[in-house]
Amino acid sequence: MTIAVIGSNMVDLISYIERMPNKGETIEAPDFSLGCGGKGANQAVAAAKCGAKVMMMTKVGDDIFGPNTIKNLESFGIDTSLCSIVPNMSSGVAPIFVDPKSQNSILIIKGANKELKPQDIDAAEDKLKECELIILQLEISLDTVYHAIEFGRKHGIEVLLNPAPADPNLSLEKISSCAFFMPNESELATLTKMPVDTDEQVLAAGNKLIEAGIKNVIVTMGSRGSMLINKDGHNKILPYKVNAIDTSGAGDAFIGSFSKYYVEHHNILEAMKVASAFAALSVTRRGTQKSYPTIDELNAFIASQS
């Protein structure tokens, strides 16, 4: 049971700040961390750390970050045979600013991620069609995302799309064959142009996507938990209460772990429950991939909550 992640990698440049500087102002920040990230790579690592067999299709630059990114993926047992280096191109980077309340603000520079093209998917057809689930995000070009969705439809492979960062140009018609659409609250608001301040509003916005043909919408809502919406109704999974230190990569943690447990058992709600625990543990540590727990830590945490 293989999961294929077709998407982005980034080098996370994380600054822990007391506040953002004003225009023209220079201030000191208390701490800094550098790590491997990117929504695609984060989701691949989360799935792999949960025990999934994962292959990653991505592109890196020929700078000092590129080979290290591929080596990092390999360290988690991820198949990197579909990763490649783009000459004369920088790798993707993500400056992240984390405030004292553990809320983050993120910039992304796509770099080599922009060079992941539809033809790369076609060239890897024989290998990709062996997978059971394809995971996508929006840190690569929309044309590549659409092509991957069509590839999944053609070969009978379920597709999970995480519409992040939210793109108002995303075509609901072209993504309607996705088995799972996983936005957070702000992404849901951007894509539907509807309010999401309450659970009732989240449900209404999610149902708009169901009407467009998407099979399952799962909205991650941070400290408010997560919600599954489909034609049969809706279910809310309550969050685990933890002391959050850094929420960077928590949504990716949820998606990667959800994917592993869904592929294994095909029980959506149970996969959401485990993913909630995995994501909750991740926010108790700094960083993105390096904050993700081991299976033993995850199982111990779940046992302690029962």
Image (cartoon, rainbow, N blue to C red):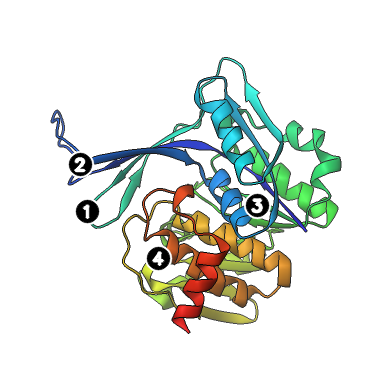
Q: Position of residue 129 (x, y in %)?
A: 83, 48
Q: Residue at x 49, y 70 (%)?
A: 277
Q: Amino acid at mark 1?
A: Pro
Residue at the spot of label 3: 135
Q: Residue at x 17, y 46 (%)?
A: 18
Structural distance between the alpha carbons of marks 2 and 1: 10 Å
Structural distance between the alpha carbons of marks 4 and 1: 17 Å
Q: Residue furthest bottom?
A: 306
Residue at the spot of label 4: 222
Earlier residue among tags 3 and 1: 1
Which residue is nearer to you in this view: 97 or 200?
97
Earlier residue among tags 4 and 1: 1
Q: Position of residue 222 (x, y in %)?
A: 40, 65
Q: Quadrant of residue 19?
A: top left
Earlier residue among tags 4 and 2: 2
Earlier residue among tags 2 and 1: 2
Q: Residue at x 39, y 72 (%)?
A: 224
Residue at the spot of label 1: 100
Check disc 2: other Cα within 10 Å, few if <14, some if 14-19, many if 20+. Answer: few
Which residue is nearer to you in this view: 168 or 160?
160
Residue at the spot of label 2: 30
